[in-house]
Amino acid sequence: MNIVTLLKHVYDENQLKIEPSKGDVDFAGVPGKISTFDRNAIEAALRLKQQHGGLVTALTIGSEESIKSIREGLAMGVDKAILIKINSHLQFDALALGNIIAKALEKIQAWDLLLCAEGSTDTYTSLLPGILASKLKLPLITYARSLKIDGKYLTGDRSLERKAVTVQVELPAIVSVVSEINEPRIPTLLQILAASKKEVLVYTLEDLGLSQLEQKYKTIQLSGKGKERKKIVLEGSLHDSVARLVDALVKEGLV
Amino acid sequence: MAIQKSNDTLDMLISATVQFCEKKIAPIADKIDRDDIIPEALYSEMRDQGMLSLILPQRYGGLGLTYSSYIHVLEIVSKYSAGVALSLEAHNSLGLEHIAKYGSEELKENIIPEIIASAKPVAWALTEPRGGSDAKRMSTTALAKQDGYILNGSKTFITHGFSADKIVVMAKTNDSISAFVIDADSEGVERTKLQGKMGTRGSDTAEIHFNDVFIPKDRLLGREGEGFEQAMELLHGGRIAVGAMAVGMAEACIDASIMYSKQREAFGSKISRFEAIRFYLADLSTELEAAKLLVEKAASLRDNGLPHRKEAAMAKYYASQVAMKAARTAIQIHGGYGFFSGSIVERMYRDAKLLEIGEGTNEVLKLIISSEILRD
């Protein structure tokens, strides 16, 4: 069972600075990190590998900086990684990224399953799994919260808003996972040290024979959105406050 | 002075340690302090995480971290639980390190996998009831006989001396001091857990009596008569590690004070707006940076095999005072809320005091520093 996971290096959204009046986002000096839900996809891949054997390869499109996140994936247990080097991880739209990934997958001789997150924590288009499935003509399971492999079949529970659907596809297949699928492991310190010795293959777009990449949309403006807090303080006895808290939460539709 | 630059691997070590502490230590830190015991399950998890073999060379299955990296792990753990950090420090810097550095290859091949598999920290027994700082005048003896030694005497204030499976003991052989590693369940070993410790609770502290304990010959570490020099060499590393603990604890107190002062209101304003509070925080942050640099410099010297007796003493002497001051000031900033158990600054205040005593009292460290600078 050879598995490919998509791994993206993104800006740490918790450290973005947003100018309060205009909402301008300042990326200067913001550190990068592994896209949060990619860790769930990696964890899912590692658990399937534990059950069925094989190799897990991480595939990244990004700048040289992405090595930091790739090493984190390798420390979690990914066997090897491929980096397709571009100038910035925000350089291409989902369609172009789909084309690059499809080409890069040719560098991986045989794979049975491609796992990715439901979306990346920066652009969050969630388009990539569909684009890849369409381009590679492979079955797709999106928003998977559990996965089970039985021979050449993959069964997955899809997490949808008010219902859950169990589906089955034949491998090879593409799957996007939601964060509920697992709790990503913390790499052990020994694995972290070992990660620096694992193989990372680096290719350029030219190496993949890609010179012109079609893009269908471009970002016109990017601005941060502040969230106004309601700052409701409930005073009085504990008994009354709890009752009013429950009422307020019900009114907000939160419980 | 060369300051080791941050790199991806070190960043990952730090990030993984923070995640581990958040998940495994933070939820039980108060319980560890209250019950004065570190659960065996936590030791197993720390073993699996590599935290029981941090500086142990890779050829013996350890991580082989440099001191410059190791101090960051200790700093982080100390922010969550000084008791756990102390146990890690005593095990990694003293007990296990003594065996790894001075044991015979045959002994290491036998004993180190057993220690790691047990997930029990190694105790290191130097201090005696009749005098801690005056180690040379110890009264514990190991009399040579044909196939080994017979150990008699007492040791006290031994970190995890009650729960350890293996104990490194310093004892007099003729006129000099030698070091041995013994099994804690050997016949003639009596251990008593000392009760009522003020801080760094969780890591048990024991008094150990040795009554005609037989030590096989191959349990001698290094050569006969080298024990004192070995112990002093290890203590230089231990002092850097205690300095790192102090840095972590001071940082925890400053972080808690920043958060509290930004929330607490008095006279219609957040108390972080008041000059008195701002000056406290400015002083503490400046002193913390200085302490960090001293610890990092001493670690860098040790990593590079350069003399660091003075620097290690300075690092522990200064950083422990910064931690103590940070804890005292943090309680002042927290007011009444900092005076009750359940507040991290109250716990750190009790914990920080040990840093001025253990691994060489600060008075002894000042004698070391002055003897180094006066060269007398």
Image (tube, rainbow, N blue to C red):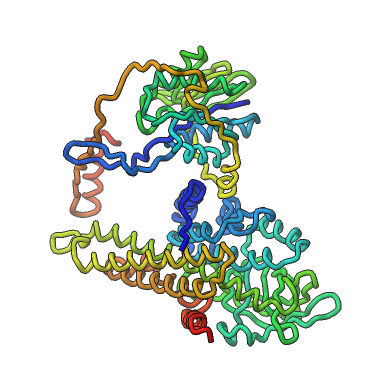
Q: Is residue B202 visible?
A: no
Q: Nearer the viewer, residue A159 or B319?
A: B319
Give how far across and how far down residue A150 sits, in percent. 62, 22
Q: Residue furthest left?
A: B268
Q: Nearer the viewer, residue A20 or B140?
A: A20
Give how far across and how far down residue B39 sits, in percent. 55, 59
Q: Residue furthest right?
A: B146
Quarter of the figure with the C terminus of chain A: top left
Give how far across and how far down residue A1 sits, in percent. 63, 26
**Is A103 located above or below residue B224 in the figure?**
above
**Is A21 located above or below residue A241 in the figure?**
above
Which residue is rendered at x = 33% and y = 66% of the image? B286
Q: Is residue A204 left or right of residue B188?
A: left
Which residue is rendered at x = 44% and y = 59% of the image? B80
Q: Is residue B329 left or right of residue B269?
A: right
Give how far across and how far down residue B138 sits, in percent. 64, 85
Q: Is residue A5 left or right of residue A252?
A: right
Q: Quadrant of residue A225?
A: top left
**Is B132 located above or below residue A52 in the figure?**
below
Which residue is rendered at x = 72% and y = 87% of the image? B175
Q: Nearer the viewer, residue A216 or B324?
A: A216
Q: Is residue A81 visible?
A: yes
Which residue is rendered at x = 74% and y = 81% of the image? B142
Q: How many marks?
A: 0
**Is B263 located above or below residue A60 in the figure?**
below
Q: Quadrant of residue A199?
A: top right
